Image: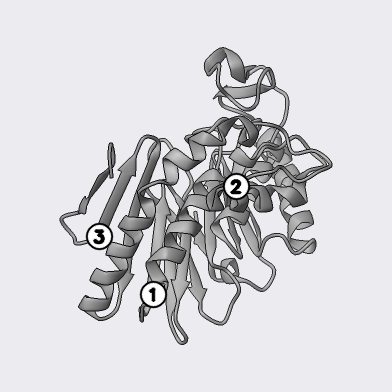
Amino acid sequence: MSGAVSGRLPDGRLHLQQGPIDLVIEAFGDAEEVGRAYAQATDRFADILETLVSELATLRRRVGTEPPRLQGPVARRMAEAVWPHRAVYITPMAAVAGAVADEVLAALVRGRRLDKAYVNDGGDIAIHLAPGQQLRAGIVADLEAPQLSGFATLHHDRPVRGIATSGCGGRSFSLGIADSATVLAATAAAADAAATLIANAVNVEAPAISRRPACEIDPDSDLGEIPVTVKVGDLSPVLVAEALDRGLCEARRLRLCGLIDSAALSLQGQWRIEAGSGALAETRVG
């Protein structure tokens, strides 16, 4: 893989990195099966970035009334994940990390007998669970100073196979002010797109909040001149609650539409959880 990093971490997990894509992968099961699975993931990773770059102009455009014409499998996963949200401003880039995780996970498990596995793309995680298996996933509230804030337990017999977190301190720009918006959904790409919108919805206007057009920070941003959050100062508990309640409304709408399983939102020490009957019903936060 030209320009890519592939190797084992000291604890045995597989690390794949190229450009902005940075994957940590772990599979559980027979050692020989795990080794073959890692080889499959490594092979699949070889052209992912190159293929995405070839369609980048289309991936950065707002989704309109017609599905974008895309060729690569990761690009198609991205478009599929954002298509249900086309009524608002969204581009396929909102699902890029989750879609990469889904694609590499599919290659990892293809034809292999694994108990469980995950592909973690900077906090957007695709998950495989064999019958009878479960996985406990940590939730981090402060994306700039990561530490465990809580957890959710995922079970084979529940539909969640993707987790994603968005917020104004994450790798991508946010229109909102959430410290974090963690979403559980059927795929990592679906969770990624939904987390973006829910984090955007955690919002209020206040002098303590600074915003700038996205293009002033990154001329290549798919958000163009849309103002994005660059700083959030201390807010009153009332404003924090108002912002979180707006995000909670969006999370509930997406859950009732069948687009997510559940969500956990945090801002300056306060939390909101939209759990339904899914894995976040077992979450511990705070």
Q: Position of residue 102 (x, y in %)?
A: 50, 58
Is residue 29 positioned above or below 276 on the image? below
User: Taking the image as drawn, is residue 125 in sight?
Assistant: no
Q: Position of residue 41 (x, y in %)?
A: 35, 60
Query: Residue 70 — which label?
Result: none
- Residue designated by label 2: 71
Q: Earlier in the sequence, mark 1 or mark 3?
A: 3
Q: CA distance from mark 1 to mark 3?
A: 13 Å
How is colour applied across the structure in the image? one colour
User: Taking the image as drawn, is residue 138 in sight?
Assistant: yes
Residue at 45% from the left image edge and 71% from the top image edge: 128
Q: CA distance from mark 3 to mark 2?
A: 31 Å
- Residue at the farthest left position: 10
- Residue designated by label 1: 116
Q: Position of residue 57 (x, y in %)?
A: 61, 29
Q: What kind of residue is marked 1?
A: Lys
Residue 39 figure quarter: bottom left
Query: Residue 13 — which label?
Result: 3
Q: Residues within 10 Å of mark 2 (few under 14, many from 20)?
A: few
Q: Secondary structure at mark 3?
A: loop
User: Are the two marked residues, 1 and 3, in contact with CB atoms closer than 8 angstroms?
Assistant: no
Residue 179 figure quarter: top right
Q: What kind of residue is marked 3?
A: Arg
Residue at 66% from the left image edge and 52% from the top image edge: 81
Q: What kind of residue is marked 2?
A: Gln
Q: Secondary structure at mark 1?
A: strand
Q: Residues within 10 Å of mark 3 (few under 14, many from 20)?
A: some
Q: Earlier in the sequence, mark 3 or mark 2?
A: 3
Residue at 73% from the left image edge and 46% from the top image edge: 245
